[in-house]
Image (tube, rainbow, N blue to C red):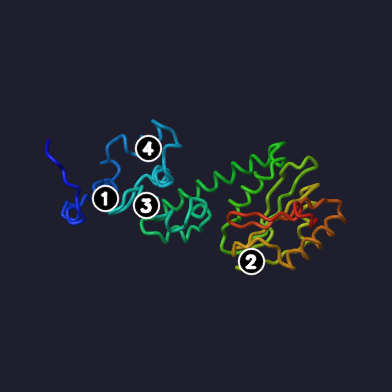
Amino acid sequence: MPHCAPQTAADVRALPQQPHPAELDPLPHLPIYKWPIHKRPREKLLRDGTGSLSDGELLAVILRMGCRGQSAVDLGQALLARFGSMHGLLSASPKEIRAVHGIGLAKSAQLQAILELARRTLTERLRDNTALDSPEVVRNYLRLFIGVRSYEVFVCLYLDSKHRLIRTVEASRGTLTHTAVYPREIAREALALNAAGLIVAHNHPSGDTRPSAADRHLTQRLSETLQLIEVKLLDHLIVGENVVFSFAERGLL
């Protein structure tokens, strides 16, 4: 029986180098209609369900077409790389999205429509009788609505006597570090909507959700103003991309 000597390092180096699997796969450089049917995102979705698709593939289904030298999947992956996550992408401004190579007005409009559908879905859940029994629903809604904007936004969720959502109002929009909020204007809107309760929220574009002295002072002033018209301030939330600070949960209301 022949004896096999162990390979030396020199033997290993002499072996032909095998290409990385990605180098063998020409699909990313081809239009999707030229891919094998079982690898096309839309066909995968129909066959195996949405959970079988990556984020880039889901975006490809929405975008439908890529651009010269890029498939729709490539374009979806480029968007995710630019904005860091699906959340970051859907919260980006139309101008920021259009700055990505291959994204024009039509594709930007498609992505904006998806974002608005997601917002409206969460708003409908908030209007449900039991929606506000789940703080996580409110947090998800606010993270999507204002969580990763590049400027400060102050929003008010006006509630009826059963804590059902009446309306969400963007009360103020500011700069990177400041937004002007007027408690009397918020109180006037609460009276106009016949609201019984209120949840207010604003974002910190820096990502640091710790309340500033100004945040604490505003919360106190707003609570006192609303008490004069018998409207209860239920919470003030400070929203980051992944974290939400609650004044109520910290006993600061």
Disc 1/disc 3 C-alpha distance (Å): 22 Å
Q: Nearer the viewer, mark 1 or mark 3?
A: 1
Kind of residue at badge 3: Leu
Q: Which is more N-terminal, label 3 or label 4?
A: 4
Q: Which residue is mark 2?
A: 174
Splitting the image into 4 quarters, where does residue 38 fall?
Answer: top left
Measured in 3D between alpha carbons, the distance from the residue under mark 1 to the one under mark 4, in whole angstroms, is 27 Å
Q: Which mark is residue 75?
A: 3
Q: Along the polypeptide, which appears first: circle 2 or circle 3? A: 3
Question: Which amino acid is tagged 2?
Answer: Gly
Q: Can you say whether 225 is above or below 160 in the image? A: below
Between label 1 and label 4, give the one nearer the viewer.
1
Q: Which label belongs to residue 20?
A: 1
The percent position of residue 207, horizontal first and vertical second, equals 60, 61
Please name the residue shown 58% across and 56% down the image.
Answer: 241
Determine the secondary structure under disc 3: helix
Locate residue 90 relative to residue 168 in the image: left or right. left
Q: Earlier in the sequence, mark 1 or mark 2?
A: 1
Q: Earlier in the sequence, mark 1 or mark 3?
A: 1
Mark 2 → mark 3, Cα distance in angstroms: 32 Å
Question: Residue at horizontal 12%, vertical 35%?
Answer: 1
Q: Residues within 10 Å of mark 1 (few under 14, many from 20)?
A: few
Q: Which residue is mark 4?
A: 42
